[in-house]
Image (spheres, helix red, strand yellow):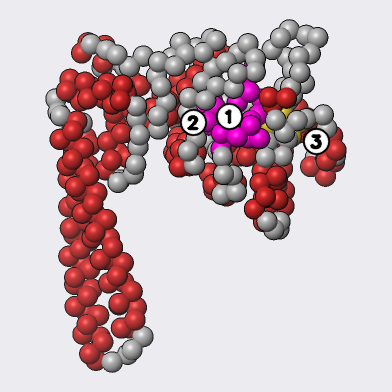
Amino acid sequence: MLKKTSLIKPFFFLFFSLSFFHQAKSSSIYDQYLDLIENEFDHTEGHQNRYLIVTRPINDEYLEKLKNLKDLDKKKLTEGLSRDLKEIKDCPYPTFFFENTEKTTPISIAVSLGKVSLVKKFLSVIEDVNSDHCLAWGYRQPYTLAHMALDPQYPLAKAFVSKEDRLAIVDALAQKKADFNYIVRTHDYKNPPLSAGEPSGRELREISTFLRARALLFGADPELGGSSFSGVRLKYTYSTYKNNSLTQECLKQYLEKVSLGEAVSPLPKVLDHLKEAANETGFDLDERVTQLKTFALEREKLNAIRQKIDVEITDLKSQQTKRSKRKVRHLQNVKQELDQGLTKLDRTTLRLLRTS
C-alpha cells in the first residue's frame, strides 16, 4: 500500500511547478523590457545618456497590460509622466491620487525584480541614488530606490527573488550612499524605507526581517516613523529577546559583515541594542568584533599571498625548465599550507558566529 507522503509529493511538485511558471509568466513582460533597456544601455555612449536611459519615466500600468513587447508604443510608455515626482499636481480625486501614480523607471523595475547584476550596471551611471529622478510611485507615496529595495512586493509582487539577491541589492544601494531614512514629502503618506510594505497591509514577514536588519546596518533609524508607520522595535528584556527576530537577525548580519571585512554603519542607538543583545546571549560584542576583524585581516593577507603565488606558478610553468618545475612544486606546497590556514580561519570564524 502506498504511503500518503508518496501520493502527496507528486501533487506538491506539480503545484510548485505551476506556481513558479505562473510567477515567471506574470513578470515576463518586465523581463523582456529590461532586456531591451539593457541592450539600449550597452549600445549607448556617454555617462549622461546612459543615466537618462535608466531613470527614464515609464508608465507601469501600460507596460503591465502589454501582451507582447513587439506592440510596445514608446510614446504611450512615457506619455504624461514627469522625471521628477515632486512636480506632480493634485487630481480631483482623493488626495493620494496624482498624475504620476503609474510612474516607474528601469532602475526601479530592476530593483523590484531582484536583478542584481543589472541593478549594479545601472547604478554605475547614477551619481546620486537619492535623486528625485530615481523616484517611482510606490504604495500611495513616492518611493526612493531604498523604499523599493525594502518593499519588493510593490509593484511586482509576483516575481520570486531569493533572499540573497534581495540583500545584495540593498548592499549595492548602500555602497552608492543610499539614504535609508529619506522620506519624499509630497503627499499624505510619508513613510520611510524601513516601513517595508507594512503600511499597505502586506508586510513581508520573514523577508521583511532580513531586509530591515540590513537597512539598520546601513544607518536606518528604527525610531523614525511616518504617516502610517511607527518605526520598529529593538528594545527588549531577556524574555522578549528570544522572540525578537529583528534584533537577532540584525546582530547575526552585523557579525557576518564584520567577519567578511565589509563596512557597516549602524546608528549608535542600533549598536547599543546589539551590544545589549550580545550580553544577553552571553558574549561581549566589542570583543567578538575585534576577534572577527583580526581573522578577516588575516584571511585577506593569506588570500593576497595565495594570488601572488598563483601568478608566479603560471609564469614558471611557461618556462618549461627543470628549475622552474622544482619551484612550481615548492610553491604548490606553500599554497597547500596557505589553504589549510584559510580553512582553519574559516572554521574558527564560523564557530564564533554560531556561538553569537
Left or right of 206? Residue 321 is left
Horizontal and vertical percent for residue 313?
30, 77
Horizontal and vertical percent for residue 135?
64, 30
Instruction: Return the residue found at the far top.
Output: 94
Please identify the quarter of the rendering in which residue 115 is found: top right
Three-letter residue code for mark 1: Thr
Does 191 appear in magenta? no
State whether residue 167 is above or below residue 212: below
Quarter in which the N terminus is drawn: top left
Left or right of 40? Residue 249 is left
Q: Earlier in the sequence, mark 2 or mark 3?
A: 3
Please identify the quarter of the rendering in which residue 107 is found: top right
Work out how far the residue at label 1 is from the one at label 3, CA to CA, in angstroms: 21 Å
Q: Which mark lies nearer to you, 2 or 1? A: 2
How many marks are shown on the rendered structure?
3
Three-letter residue code for mark 2: Asp
Work out how far the residue at label 2 is from the one at label 3, CA to CA, in angstroms: 29 Å
Left or right of 32? Residue 80 is right
Q: Which residue sits at x=56%, y=34%?
A: 130
Q: Secondary structure at mark 1?
A: loop
The circle drawn on residue 77 is 3
Q: Secondary structure at mark 2?
A: loop
Marks 2 and 3: CB-CB under 8 Å? no
Q: Earlier in the sequence, mark 1 or mark 3?
A: 3
**Which residue carries the number 2 mark?**
179
Bounds of the magenta segment: 129-152
Marks 2 and 1: CB-CB under 8 Å? yes
Instruction: Return the residue found at the far bottom.
Output: 321
State whether residue 77 is above or below residue 320: above
**Which residue carries the number 1 mark?**
144
Three-letter residue code for mark 3: Leu
Quarter in which the C terminus is drawn: top left
